[in-house]
Amino acid sequence: MMKLRRFSLRRFSVFTLTVSYVAMSIAILAIFAIPLSYAWEQTIEKGGMELLEEDTQRLVATFNEQGAKELADTIDKRVGTQLYGEKILLLTDASYTRLDGNLPGWPRDLPRTGGTYKIALHLNNVLVRAVLIHTVLPGGYHLVVGRDVSRYNSLKSYFFYGLTVAAAIVLLVGVLGGLLIRRVLLLKVSSMRQTALAIVEGDLSHRLPTQGDDDELDLMAQTVNRMLDQIEHLIHGVRNVSNAIAHDLRTPLTELRFRLEEISVGRPPLDTTFAEIDSAVADVDRVIQIFNALLRLAEIDTGARRSGFVSVDVSTVANDIVEFYQPVAELKGINLHFQSEGKMVLAGDPFLLAQAVGNLIDNALKYAQENGSIRVEVMRGSGGAIDLIVADDGPGIPDEEKPKVSKRFYRGDASRGTPGVGLGLSLVNAVAELHGGALILGDNFPGLRATLRLFPTAGKK
């Protein structure tokens, strides 16, 4: 017995899907962070610099209009009323001696030339990262206006901490979700594997379990079950056909051997010998007839004939076959009547359709009453189907035998004394299925009403 290989997470497709989902989600978070970072640079930092420049221009205007003493007083008031660390202000004379501001002296790392600089300095004994605008005023005075940019570091940290936590949550949810999905899928796949292994072992009655949820796996299981139904049907058909062939061929072959042995041993007169040879030829013809019918059925079962479908008028085909059998019907005193609702076109195989109609009419001629009647009709059926009906007034078929007569080599009680091998209705049913339809057997009160139901769109699939 085959051993089930243990599933590996690395081999299972859910692992790939989970990794792809997590990677995509983290990438989306990263892409989301890029414009936010850009917005931070443009809005917070650039906006802060613009405020610093505007503040510097106002202080320079105060100096130009009212002098250094008034500027020192303004800075002193600003330092006394502002929040802690809100602005960095410093006014010095030409020798860089502090006149006013919240810096104890000239920053060591600040260049003596005017401009905008980012340096580290101590503010109230705390080391901070600052942006400073150094302006050289008339008379050698120096004005420094700045702000502590490290105040926003915590906000940046919170933002990136949030992104990190979000990425961790996405990773955790993705992994847990992937494991959960993997578990559910493995349960279903394992059940399918067990069923498949049972089928491989030869038990064709097993079917894949379905939940009726119409999800993807359930739909696949339903499709596979339909395929298994067809495979089981075909295998049983092959077995039945093999048994039937062995049974039906044994009789004519036994008779053939008996006749030839009788001729060989008895050495009968020439007339008797030729008569036995004619009977032997008839037995061989019967065997050939069986093989030809089986070959046609096999060709139909494979669907190979569908590739050669052409546009066919069913009414024309039926009318031609009725005309072909008309002389036979007249010899038997049977009224063979044809009626059609008009042109009925479909995509199909004209030769097989003609053979199917011929088989139905041939069966009707065998069982119709003496001086009886056979009616052949072509009409539009339900659902856009084309119904080809052959109705006779013979003994009909009992209800319990109707599902069986279309099986290969089946011969009912009424057909025991008539020539045939039990493949006629099987061929008709196969032709109907090839054209997407079915053979429907009903009562004609009295007689049999056989309906060959065809669908115009069957050959276009």
Image: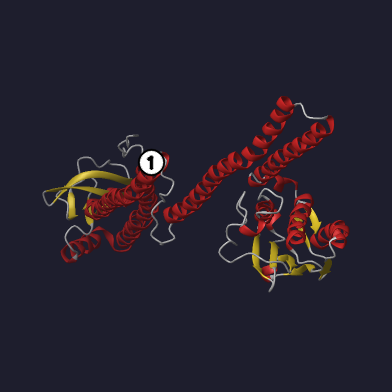
Assign a secondary structure to mark 1: helix
Q: Can residue 133 be seen here?
A: no
Closest to the observer: 337 or 181? 337
Measuring 33% from the left and 47% from the top, which residue is drawn there? 186
Residue 321, compared with residue 268, is above or below; it is: below
Residue 198: percent from the left, percent from the top?
A: 38, 43
Residue 11: percent from the left, percent from the top?
A: 36, 37
Q: Amino acid at mark 1?
A: Leu
Measuring 11% from the left and 49% from the top, which residue is drawn there? 125
- The scheme the figure's colours follow is secondary structure
Residue 430: percent from the left, percent from the top?
A: 66, 52
Please, which residue is most extreme toward the bottom here? 445
Total tally of numbered discs in the picture: 1
Residue 391: percent from the left, percent from the top?
A: 74, 67
Q: Which residue is mark 1?
A: 197
In this rendering, position of residue 310 left or right of residue 251? right
Residue 233, compared with residue 268, is above or below; it is: below
Q: Can residue 224 be seen here?
A: yes
